[in-house]
Each structure stands twice: as C-alpha cells, then as structure tokens.
Image (spheres, rainbow, N blue to C red):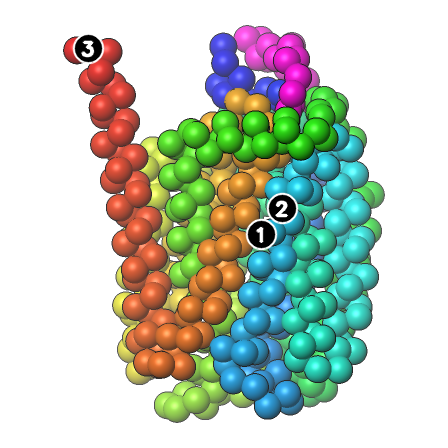
Amino acid sequence: MSPASTGASTTVGAALPVPSVDSTDSDSRMTPGGPGYRRMSLALFLAGVATFALLYSTQALLPLISGEFGVTASEASWTVAAATGGLALFVLPMSALSERFGRRTVMTASLAVAVTVGLLVPFAPSIGALVVLRAVQGAALAGLPASAQAYLAEEVRPKALITAIGLFVAGNSVGGMSGRVITGWVAQEWGWRVAVAVIGVVAVGCAVAFRLLLPAPKHFRAGSLRPRVLLDTVRDHLANPLLRRLYAIGALFMTVFGGVYTVIGYRLTGAPFGLPQGIIGSIFLVYLVGTVSASTAGRLVGRFGRRGALYLAGGTTAAGLLLSLAPALPLVLLGLVLITAGFFAGHAVASSAVSKTATHGRAQASALYQSMYYVGSSAGSTIGALAFHADGWGGTVGVGLLAVLGVVTITVLGSVAARRTLVAPAH
C-alpha cells in the first residue's frame, strides 16, 4: 500500500518504513474518540483561532486606519496584504524547519513570535511602520499552517484526516470572525489601536493553551535541511498535476475571500448603508457559517466526491457574490453567508486533498499550498481594493467571479485528466 493511501509519514531525503494500517490494532495514530484526539483537536483549533485573528486583525479596521493616516482604501489594504504576503513568502522555509526540528516546535516558536509582534502593532507611528510590522507578523505565522497539516497527516488515521483538517480550518474561521467582531466594537469606543491590542492579548492566551494541550508527536521522523533536498522535494510536488491544480484552486478561492472582506467595510460605511464600526464588525459573525462548512467538508467529499464538492463550493461562492450586489442589507448579508460557506468548504476540501496526495515531504506539499493560498489573499486584498476604487462594489464582485470561474475551469480539467487516466490502460 502506498504512502498516499495510508497517510503515513515519509520525510525529505530519507527512505523510511511506512507504518502498516492493515490492522486497526497496529495503527497507533489518533482517531476520533481515541486517546489524545480531543486535546489535539482543541489545540489546533486554538492555533487556527490565533492565526486568523492576528493575520486579519486590521481588515475590519481599514476605514479607521485610512482616516487616521490619511490614506486611500488601496493603501490601507497593504496592512492586510503585507501580512498575508509575508506568510506566503516564508511558509516554505518554515516548513523545511519543521521537517528538521519537528512540527510542534516550529508551531510553538511561530506563535510566540507572532503574538509578541502583535503586542507591538498598536504602537505603530505611521502607515509604513504598521505595514512593516504586519509583514513580520505574517512571516512569523508562516510556521503554523503547513506544519499543522503535516502534523495531522502523520498523527491522525487517514479516514479521520479530512475531518481533523476541517476542524483546524474551522478554527481559522472562528479566529477570523472573533478578531473582526471584537475589533469592530472595541474600535468604535476606543479606536483601532486598542482593538488590535485586545486581539494580541487574546492570541497570547490561545498560544499558551495550544502548547499545553498539543500531544507530543509519535510518528515524526526528522528530515534534512540541505537546500538541494528541499528543492528536489518542491520540484517533485510541482511536477504532480493534481497538486498543481489544488494549489491554483486554493489561491483562487482565497482571491475571492480576500477581496470581499477587505472591501466590505468600505461599502457598508458608505451609502446607502452608513453603518457604524461596531455593526460592521458584527457582520463578520457570518464566519460561523464557515466553521460549519469547513467541519462538514469530509461529509461533502463522501457524498459528492472531491470534484463534486469543489463544484458545489464554487457555485455557492458565485451565488453569494451575485446576491451581494443587491442594494438591500439583508440580501448583502445573505450573499456574505454564501461566499463564506463556499470558501471554507472549498479550502478544506483542497487542503486535505494536498495532505492525502503527497507521498513524501508533506510539510513542503502543504507549504506550497499555503504559499499559493496566501498569495491569493494578498492579490485579492490588493486587486479587490483597486477594483472597488475604480468601479465600486461591482468591480470587486467582478474580480471574485473571474476567480470562481478559474476554480470551475481547473476542476473540469481535472475531471478530463482523470477520465483519460482511466481510459488509457484499456487502450
């Protein structure tokens, strides 16, 4: 049985024995209801909360940041794009460190640095300093996503992997939601600096709980830090057509999401809505829908298959984008619900497929996905803001629809490639 089908760990530059899963008794990896699974799930859930709360802590506050520093929406959006860009740039090097020093060690160090920077962000004296601090914070957080997925692929049984990764992604959605809701109401009373400081303190608590709860890894095998070995592993992953498609899908889904949630605050503070900052922050409660859709991704794949689940996620996202064009606030909110549900479902399906597809160097495979994912976030934040500046909310929606079209096209190409693979042996 291949490593891809077992979910067993292999490492960069080493040929190691693959644990057998032919018998349930011989497989010591975690499973729902088993020892350590609940602690592991809660720990990674909290890591996901801290990651997204910190990463997007300024997103709901962009109108206030624009007002204080006298900058445009596209300029203020760099406080988001710099963080996600830093993460995208450093996720691959951090994944290499996790292959050598261990998943838990790298995740702990990453959170420690990120929360420390998070406590400095409120004191930024200028928009330039704020962007630099946010870039450093994003680079520090790069050790979380790929290492977490590699940890799950090694420590959780294959049948439970999609559910486990879905819970981690659900933590992302809760972090994104709570960060925006908290900052919205705090900023309305005391300003954006106090709001960002509160998020930093919440993240400190999550980081401490994560380190205390996460079980020590039992199936990790240290790999090599040699650059050539890392490059060979990356080359192998990029040569895999399925992995390339999954990376592109993750980037395109995040382009939609980054654009919509970077710009939505500007739309809702303007006519015809004119909402106050606290109410705008509360709108991010729709992230709870993402928590549900991400955690049920395993059931979607079981019922519709991976490609069917991606079609469903893409269609739901597109429907939400179109609905958000309406001038009525309830319809805009319903559109945001559909966009959020579709995005988190698509992300959970694609990211779990990467972990199952990679046969070696899982941290690098996940890192490449995360890198493209956050490149999509940076692109969505920047292009979405520019489109909004040029053509209003319709411009941002147009960018999102093009990205969804890309997801559907890539998935169709994957279906065609799969049929060709099945037909070729018969011929």
Residue located at (70% from left, 29% from top): 226
Task: Mark 3: give few (<14), some (14-19) or many (20+) Cα within 10 Å.
Answer: few
State the image coordinates of residue 71 (x, y, percent, origin top left): 56, 86
The residues colored magenta run 11-31
Q: Kindly give the residue lying farthest to the front in the view shown.
A: 228
Q: Where is residue 404 shown, x and y percent of the image?
A: 32, 55
Q: Is residue 29 magenta?
A: yes
User: Which one is nearer the viewer's eye here, 80 or 177?
Assistant: 80
Instruction: Give the answer, above or below, for where 370 lies relative to 362.
Output: below
- 121 inside magenta stretch: no
Q: Are marks 2 and 1 in contact (CB under 8 Å)?
A: yes
Q: Amino acid at mark 2?
A: Val
Q: Which residue is mark 3?
A: 426
- Which image quadrant is residue 24 in? top right
Marks 3 and 2, Cα distance to the nearest angstrom? Answer: 42 Å
Q: Which is more foreground, mark 3 or mark 2? A: 2
